[in-house]
Amino acid sequence: MDKLTNSPAWQDLAEHANMLRCMHLSDIVKRDEARGQRDYLNAVSLSVNFARQRMLPETWQLLYALADQQGLAKSIEAMFTGEAINHTEGRAALHTALRAELDEGLVQDNAPVYAQVREQLARMEVMVAKIRAKQWRGFSGLPITDVVNLGVGGSDLGPNLAVSALKEGDELIRTHYLSSMDGAKTAALLSQLDPHTTLFVFASKTFSTIDTLANAKTALEWLVCGGATKALAYKQHFIGVSANAKKMTEWGIHPDNQLFFWDWVGGRYSMWSTIGLTIAIALGMDKFRAMLRGASDMDQHFRSSVWSENIPVRMALATVWNRNFLHIHGKAILPYDARLALLPAYLTQLIMESNGKSVDIEGNRIEYRTCPIVWGEVGPNAQHAFYQLLHQGTEVVTCDFIAPVHRPDIEAEPDVPTRRALAFQHQLAMANLLAQSTVLMLGNDALKKAPEEAYRYYAGNQPSNTILLKQLDPYCLGALIAMYEHQTFAEAMIWKINPFDQWGVELGKQIAVTTMNALDSGDLSGLDITTQAIIAQWSQL
Ligand code: F6P
């Protein structure tokens, strides 16, 4: 048996779960009316209610004991102080330093962390000001109107989420995001843009990701076809953002147009770095800094709060409880605000690329479950899509219901009829959020009343968190995302896995190179027989 599953804190939880598993959440809630008031936390403009978890007060105590046993406090300090906790790559994971307000004197690779971060932010600010003031000009002298971020994974999802969540429709510069290697969306977007006035941000930590290289090559060809010389295309139409200065230079990014970040920033934790350039271009540097402040305040909350008052830690412990003791395999992210439509995609990378691991930090295969399958969708849309499975399927799923409480955009001038209609819509969404999570919790007893109508039965007993933001602004979004980062980290520390590497994505990349070479040469003999068959079948279409 694994050391972890054999440990006292784990065994205590297992025993407690055996007792609790036969209690329906509706009974738990009925017997403990104080839980709604007690099991919630309010910090950094977020309020998280855990009352709909299948837990008793003592469950939390047993989970805090597990956190202590697993040395969570020490791990948190190790992360914040820059220890090389990403041991398979021999690196620190210092995304928190990207938003730190004070210089803690950290040093990485013989360089001062805080000073480097400030220097790159200052360079980024100069570029942003120039672009937003329409002083960044294209090859023919016209000002840039459109900026296209070329990046994938962590070099795409965070900026794309932040801009789509926070833009207000009056942007000085339009921003666009191209990630997928297939080029289909690239073709469609480029056909709508003008090469004279389009700037590309080549965003890639490694500067060797084939997806982004392919999109950048197409963009370069498009600029040249549109009349730019190669030299002017490189100089006036590309900014590079990377941790690999050498590769940026080799590709052709002009030295003045290079922004840096560092190996000690994980790709999926990089939106706070210069990777956030397009956020600042779209929204302005002040809003980007406000986002950093929200994240930084969440960092302080995570680092200094006791477990019972610590939002990310309690979120993580709820995951461990649901995953390892109630054996729930799925987790749905359900924002009740369409501006957060990209949050589920962002969190699938953050959570699953971080914690989709089955080897512990000592290199042993582990037997207990780690990361659940995470997916999601804007809640009101998902109600008309996959909620059927949530309510009546055979899988139990945990849910995060997320919404902003205030909508300053509609709260001002409430008597304007359109505003009144919008306020109604906001309330409608909140009512639905509450109704859906209530049904998931309580179910119904229709079966008892009319056994012949079993199809009307809702089992309930499905746990959820209710996560409310004061409002959807840069500060609150920063805090929300940092909360999920720390939740993910705390889960990994309990499971004793490394959340900062992603070796599971490497083999597929290698095989793709072999396959590409085979397609190029026409010699398929090195490919497995099923691949050969599928390629042969292409010609039948
Ligand atoms: O393939 C996975 C991955 O390495 C992610 O971890 C990363 O966010 C993404 O690819 C993009 O990498 P890069 O920023 O180096 O282009």
Image: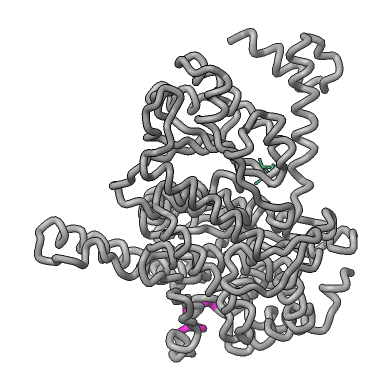
26 within the magenta span: yes
Q: How many marks?
A: 0
281 within the magenta span: no
Residue at 10% x, 58% y is 417
Residue at 47% x, 83% y is 29
- Does the rendering let one see residue 200? yes
* Horizontal relation, residue 125 to residue 192: left or right: right
Q: Which residues are magenta?
A: 24-29
| Quarter of the image that includes the N terminus | bottom right
Residue at 63% x, 37% y is 255
| Ligand 1 image position (quadrant) | top right
101 relative to 131, above or below: below
Main secondary-structure element of the magenta-colored stretch? helix
* Horizontal relation, residue 45 to residue 273: left or right: left
Relative depth, front residue between 143 and 52: 143
Q: Quarter-wise, where is residue 63 in the image? A: bottom right
Q: Quarter-wise, where is residue 505 in the image? A: top right
Q: Position of residue 350 (x, y in %)?
A: 62, 55
Residue at 90% x, 60% y is 364
Q: Position of residue 531 (x, y in %)?
A: 75, 21
Q: Position of residue 362 (x, y in %)?
A: 89, 63
- Does the rendering let one see residue 347? no
Relative depth, front residue between 320 and 439: 320
Relative depth, front residue between 190 and 521: 190
68 relative to 137, above or below: below
